[in-house]
Image (cartoon, grey):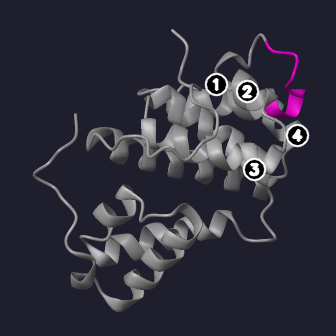
Amino acid sequence: MSFEFISPKPKENYPWYLRILFRLQIKRFGKVLTPTLLWSRVPSLSLAFILFYQLFHRKKSGIPKDLQSLVMLRVAQVHRCSFCIDLNGLFLSERMGDNTKLLEVSNWKQSSSFSEFEKLALEYAEAMTQTECKVEDPLREKLKKYFSEEALIELTALISFQNLSARFNAALGIASQGLCPIPKIEEKS
């Protein structure tokens, strides 16, 4: 179900700087993504969202790009956000070059495809994503062995950001846009 009472405005009614973003998305994805159009209804929120997103994708990020995509996909699955699963699945597929982990992320605890480092990040993502944040001291201690303090702050912010994005998209009923080449990577029951 989508919320049809919140619809995108005609593209020419958005500020010029957001129309530049629209052109970039059309070039990359063949269309402007629905969440971008909806965030852009309030340009200042859109700019803040875009800036925050870009901070995670800078070259000097303390979190490897494939790990970013992995935890973002897992958060999206936990929230059952179709759009986020689709987009983050695409990014993970591109960054890994192999779809093994993409297909197994919802079953990561039982999979031998993930390193201890990746499993720890996924455990942290799930603990943070629960309605009542359930990050316990033993998990914090394990994280300190694998992540610098700066990297842990960045990972925490990344997971929080994906929670914001997934909750926004899921609440507004934003559907998958057919971006990921793997058709079914939803959360397993």
Q: Which residue matches tag 4?
A: 146
Q: Report the predominant secondary structure element of the magenta stretch.
A: loop
Which of pointers 3 and 1 lies earlier in the amino acid sequence? Answer: 3
Callout in the foreground (1, 4): 4
For the question of whether residue 140 can be seen, the reply is: no
Callouts 3 and 2 close, C-beta under 8 Å: no
Report x, y in % for residue 70. 70, 39
Q: Nearer the viewer, residue 128 or 39?
A: 39
Q: Nearer the viewer, mark 3 or mark 1?
A: 3
Is 122 placed above or below 180 here?
above
Separation of residues labelled 3 and 1 (CA atoms): 33 Å
Q: Amino acid at mark 4?
A: Tyr
Disc sitting over residue 136 in the figure: 1
Q: Earlier in the sequence, mark 4 or mark 2?
A: 2
- At 67% from the left and 50% from the top, the residue drawn is 91
Judging depth in this view, the residue of 181 and 175 nearest the camera is 181
Check residue 139 in the rendering and tell me which mark sits there, or answer none.
Answer: 2
Would you identify the image quadrant in which residue 13 lies? bottom left
The residue to which callout 3 is attached is 94
Which segment did they paint magenta?
A: 111-118
How many C-alpha atoms fall within 10 Å of the one at disc 3: few (<14), some, or many (≥20)?
A: some
Disc 1/disc 2 C-alpha distance (Å): 6 Å
Residue kind at label 3, given as amino acid type: Glu
Q: Secondary structure at mark 4?
A: helix
Does 39 sit left or right of 50 as displayed? left
Residue 112 among those drawn in magenta = yes
Quadrant in the picture for the N terminus: top left
Q: CA distance from mark 3 to mark 2?
A: 30 Å
Position of 122 compared to 40: left or right? Answer: right
